[in-house]
Image (cartoon, coloured by chain):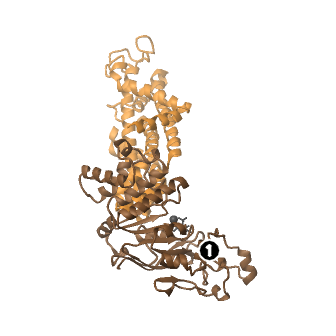
Amino acid sequence: MRSELRKIDRFWRVYKKRKSAVAGLIILTVLVTIIVFAPVFSPYDPDAKDAIPFTPPGSEHLLGTNDIGVDILSEMIYAGRVSLIVGITAAGIVVFIGSLIGLFAGFLGGWVDEILMRITDIVIILPRFPLMIVMAAYLGPGVWTIIFAYSIVGWPSLTRQIRSQILSVKEASFIEASRATGAGNIRIMFTHVLPNIQGIIIANGVMEIMFAILTEAGLSFLGLGDPTQKSWGVMLYFAQIQGAFLRGAWWWIFPPGICIALISCSFNYIGTALNDLFGLKLGK
Amino acid sequence: MDAIYRITDLTKSYPLPGGGLLKKNRKVFRAVDKVSLEINSGDTFGIVGESGSGKTTLARLLLRLIEPTDGNVYYKGRDVFRLNRSELKKTRKEIQMIFQDPYSSLDPRKSIFNIIAEPLKVHKTGSLSDIHTRIVETLELVDLPTSDDFLSKTPGEISGGQRQRIGIARALVLKPEFVVADEPVSMLDASIKAGIIELMTQLKKKINLTYVFITHELALAYHFCNRIAVMYLGEVVETGNIDDVIQSPAHPYTRLLLDSIPPTEPDPDWLDKRFGKSDFSRNAEGCKFFVRCPNPKDSCLHFRPSLSEIKRGHMVACQLG
Ligand SMILES: Nc1ncnc2c1ncn2[C@@H]1O[C@H](COP(=O)(O)OP(=O)(O)OP(=O)(O)O)[C@@H](O)[C@H]1O
Ligand SMILES: [Mg+2]
């Protein structure tokens, strides 16, 4: 237990030297706190439509209201929940698929590797965004549609990275030592190989969340999101179709846009830092 | 005395870097080259040779950690490379290995407890408390602390000497019948080395096992072993009882090792000058030791000697011997 604490302490000392990574962590903490405790922070009910439509920002409505009289700030805070949950879920699925395929391909090698990597090559050259649009259009708009579409096309680049890490870990002599005790492939893969690349998986997972949130925003903006579960992307979609741009209702457009940018940047900075830090430690 | 291991014409080739895409055009070199040996039950069998002579590769083959290119290994009369998965697992319970590198052979993410417990868990030897008892016993055997604090440490938190003791404990915890110790001290500081050698000596007295002891120091082999094989570039060039080999070495390479002359790399120019032949590779047809032999005959360039008996149980692969 004490050794774990020491490790975390050592990790933090390196981490905190990176300004961007610390900034990312602060922004993320603030955003996530607000989003998680949405009822505390949002001034109004995000479904209440009782304000005057298109009110500009003011003392009563800090970020104004939309076309049906919903308080933008409140709506935005609750929309963060959807964006974040979709992002984390989609990233989780992608990490799961990518790690497993990378693990089996890299560790087992031979024809298993051959087949899995050929599939990966094919999926990686598919035009992602158009394909997701087609899938979403076919399955009907919705949160799960977006998660599904993202999971189908999102895993290959992660898979390749995991696989290359595994190729180096599997040469370590503790793998051979484990085999010599009588351990089989499955045991070795899950008790020795995977734990030794968990840092890389976590770092990539954080980056995946960013990609997933951006993708969700993009697809939702095109109208492929769930109109009853508003995310930041869905907010932008409504802003666009309800004429926010024509009416100059900038307060409806900028806030969700800035939120998307902020959360993406923070995941990006954190992920990059983690990738470097875990990359350095690999093999020790 | 019955042979616990019988090795016949064992060969492991690796492709040389470069070469064509076509498999048959690729040049290979033999890390282990037609090795035949018998290891008797109760032996402490030394395998001696300089770096790159194929000692680790031979050990890996004995435990079937790699597949051979050619040849057979019989453990207790059964071909190791023909065992099916469950037979192999059962066999691995009896044969264990201590690895050369105490740093990379322990999983940095596992606790000491989990590292030593792994063989017991793999072979489902009993409950967690049985495992704990067994681990404590084994740690005492290798002179390591048995406190919970120590058991929860990771390899990164203990010294090199302690790590190698963990490696030894892991090999012994299943109470094997056969243990290969692959240069267990070559990567340790001189001060720590003595302790490990002392421990190995004690263990040899305490536990009656068949050992294969790999080293590049003839003196260490002399200290430990009753029989020995000297390897040079994948081949066994001399084998026999330790006293025979040390007292009347028959192969010039063994003599070279005995004189502890640091073996030098062959000088290719010298060869060209003498024979006007520039394409002399490891795979040439002549004696592999030719280039370094103190007084070779011309015929050694074209003839590769195989092991022949010069005295009962003492074999050498040299025309001059
Ligand atoms: N997987 C491999 N691929 C290619 N060549 C290999 C491989 N494993 C070993 N070799 C080569 O085989 C030769 C023998 O290697 P091995 O590790 O068996 O030597 P060793 O006697 O154990 O040396 P050391 O004392 O340095 O441990 C070396 O030249 C090595 O480079
Ligand atoms: Mg070796």
Quadrant assignment, res B218: bottom right
Residue at 50% in and 70% down: B222
In the rendered image, residue B257, in percent from the top left (x then y), is placed at: 59, 72
Q: Is B239 rendered above or below residue A35?
A: below
Chain letter for the brown part: B
In the rendered image, residue A106, in percent from the top left (x then y), is placed at: 44, 58
In the rendered image, residue A180, in percent from the top left (x then y), is placed at: 38, 63
Which residue is at the front of the view, B299 or A74?
Answer: B299
What's the amino acid at mark 1? Leu
Give the residue pinned by disc 1. Answer: B256
Please identify which colour was used for chain A in the image: orange
Q: Is A23 rendered above or below residue A273?
A: above
Q: Residue furthest left?
A: B127
Q: Is residue A174 left or right of residue B21?
A: left
Quadrant assignment, res B304: bottom right
User: Which chain is indicated by disc 1?
Assistant: B
Which residue is at the front of the view, B237 or B286?
Answer: B237
Q: Secondary structure at mark 1?
A: helix
Q: Residue furthest bottom?
A: B299
Q: Residues within 10 Å of mark 1 (few under 14, many from 20)?
A: some
Residue at 55% in and 80% down: B248
